[in-house]
Image (spheres, grey):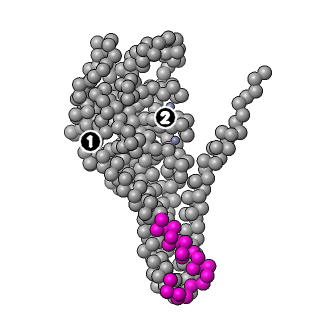
Amino acid sequence: MASAPCQFPRRCVRLLSWVPVLVVTAAALWSYYAYVVQLCLTTLNSTAEKGEVAYLAMFHVCFGMFSWAFWRSVFTAPSSPSKEFQLSSTDKQRYAQQDTLQARRRILVEISQELPVHTRSASGEIRFCHQCQLIKPDRCHHCSACQTCVLKMDHHCPWLNNCVGFSNYKFFLLFLTFSLLCCSFIIATVSPYFIRLWLGEYLSSSVKLHVLFLMLVSLMFFITLSFLLGIHCWLVTKNRTTAEWLSAPFFRHGPDQGAFDVGLKQNVRQVFGPQRRLWLLPVFSSHGDGQVFPLRRRAASDTPQALPSNTTYVDEEVKVMGELVYLKPLSSYV
Ligand SMILES: [Zn+2]
Ligand SMILES: [Zn+2]
């Protein structure tokens, strides 16, 4: 009798993958204690400083928004492709029965004609995930850590123990933004005490330690987060994911890194949604379903190349949000 595969190593890896999240949580809780209890309630009270209430109010707003965005980034499950992208049991059987790679490719081409997919693999084939048994929608990638295909996958973030993709990219951006805001606020308000500490003025030894670490950790995160947020702001303006920045998506006409760039305003709206009042709140407001994306006109109208010999595609442009175009599902063929 065959024994069941041991699940222990996989469970250990799963448990260990939460360690970075716990580290971030511990750092956040410690900074809360150091700032609120040690600095505002102990030091400012004892030295009769005036800014205590304002400091506390501002810090709680920043910290509250940071915690909310962090929570949503960690616990929002990555979106996976809908059922229409998955192979039916008949198609799976048909696909498995084919002896040649060419025949399997033909089946995928045939199935994909009913789907709104425009990206291809580097070799010009339909992108197919063997693990999930589905045709990957545009901008979708399989994450080996999450063991699923993730819509508009940006990257797998170990600090969140989650994939950053269509469902939580906005939350991730807000997490970076509010983290940076918290660090900036701490640096701005702790700096005077940090300077006094170096000049050898008052402050008990325990407060000294907290002020010192608060300042150093905030500075360290401020530099790192500024760099990271700067890159992601640029990516949003270009409508690129980190994956697409590192490796341009392929189409039938070849690689095209700017294929999804449909203008600054629409690029930002795709991530944050049409309602500006929701932009700074970690609630889902991104545009679309994560499976179909508007394409820049040039990318949409390029002549297809290297088509399978027995297939002819007919692309149709449709108007979206005024001036944008994207291709209809590749359903028209001869
Ligand atoms: Zn997959
Ligand atoms: Zn992942």
Is the distance from the Cβ of mark 2 to the nearest ligand 1 atom less than 8 Å?
Answer: yes
In this rendering, which labeled residue sits more in front, label 1 or label 2?
2
Q: Which portion, as a residue range, is magenta?
A: 198-220
Asked if residue 189 can be seen in this view, the reply is: yes
* Label 1 close to label 2 by CB (< 8 Å): no
Is the distance from the Cβ of mark 1 to the nearest ligand 2 atom less than 8 Å?
Answer: no
**Secondary structure found at label 1:** loop
| Quarter of image, res 323 | top left
Separation of residues labelled 1 and 2 (CA atoms): 25 Å
Q: Position of residue 113 (x, y in %)?
A: 36, 20
Q: Residues within 10 Å of mark 1 (few under 14, many from 20)?
A: many
Tell whether position 209 is magenta: yes
Q: Position of residue 267 (x, y in %)?
A: 30, 46
Residue at the disc numbered 1: 262
Quarter of the image that includes the N terminus: top right
Q: Is residue 334 left or right of residue 180?
A: left
Q: Is residue 58 left or right of residue 308?
A: right
Report the residue at 58% width, 53% height from top.
Answer: 20
Main SS, magenta region, reads: helix
Task: Give the amino acid at mark 2.
Answer: His
Which mark sits nearer the N-terminus, 1 or 2? 2
Q: Position of residue 59 (x, y in %)?
A: 48, 70
Residue at the disc numbered 2: 142
Q: Position of residue 334 (x, y in %)?
A: 29, 12
Tell whether position 248 is magenta: no
Residue 191 drawn above or below residue 71: below
Q: Nearer the viewer, residue 74 or 61?
A: 74
Q: Residues within 10 Å of mark 2 (few under 14, many from 20)?
A: some
Asked if residue 59 can be seen in this view, the reply is: no
Q: Nearer the viewer, residue 273 or 164?
A: 164
